[in-house]
Image (spheres, rainbow, N blue to C red):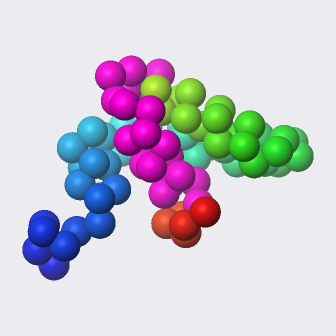
């Protein structure tokens, strides 16, 4: 697949987070919140906060796209 047709989140994830430096922590934050019956929006916000801790200079819209892809396993919500 050429880069021209690569999904946007793939390009951003590679450029921002080489070696998945924070993906496990982001997913863990989301899953832990979900296991406590916290509403999805708050669990996603917690995961986004973890991502921003590792990558404070990433725009919120970009971070939301990456984090959503990770926690929803690629499903569009």
Q: Position of residue 59 (x, y in %)?
A: 37, 31
Left or right of residue 49, residue 43 in this image: right
Q: Position of residue 54 (x, y in %)?
A: 41, 25
Residue placed furthest toward the right: 37
Q: Is residue 58 above or below residue 24?
A: above
Residue placed furthest toward the front: 61
Judging depth in this view, the residue of 59 and 54 nearest the camera is 59
Quarter-wise, where is residue 5 in the image? Answer: bottom left
Residue 67 lies in the magenta-colored region? yes
Left or right of residue 51, residue 32 in this image: right
Quarter-wise, where is residue 11 in the image? Answer: bottom left
Judging depth in this view, the residue of 18 and 45 nearest the camera is 45
Residue found at x 16% / y 78%: 1
Residue found at x 12% / y 69%: 4
Judging depth in this view, the residue of 33 and 24 nearest the camera is 33
Q: Is residue 58 visible?
A: yes
Residue found at x 31% / y 49%: 13
Residue placed furthest toward the bottom: 1
* Residue bounds of the magenta highlight: 53-72
């Amino acid at each position: 697949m050429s880069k021209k047709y690569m999904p946007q989140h793939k390009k951003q994830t590679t450029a921002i987070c080489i070696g998945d430096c924070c993906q496990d922590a982001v997913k863990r934050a989301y899953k832990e919140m979900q296991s406590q019956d916290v509403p999805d929006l708050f669990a996603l916000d917690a995961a986004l906060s973890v991502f921003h801790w590792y990558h404070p200079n990433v725009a919120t819209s970009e971070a939301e796209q990456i984090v959503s892809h990770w926690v929803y396993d690629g499903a569009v919500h």
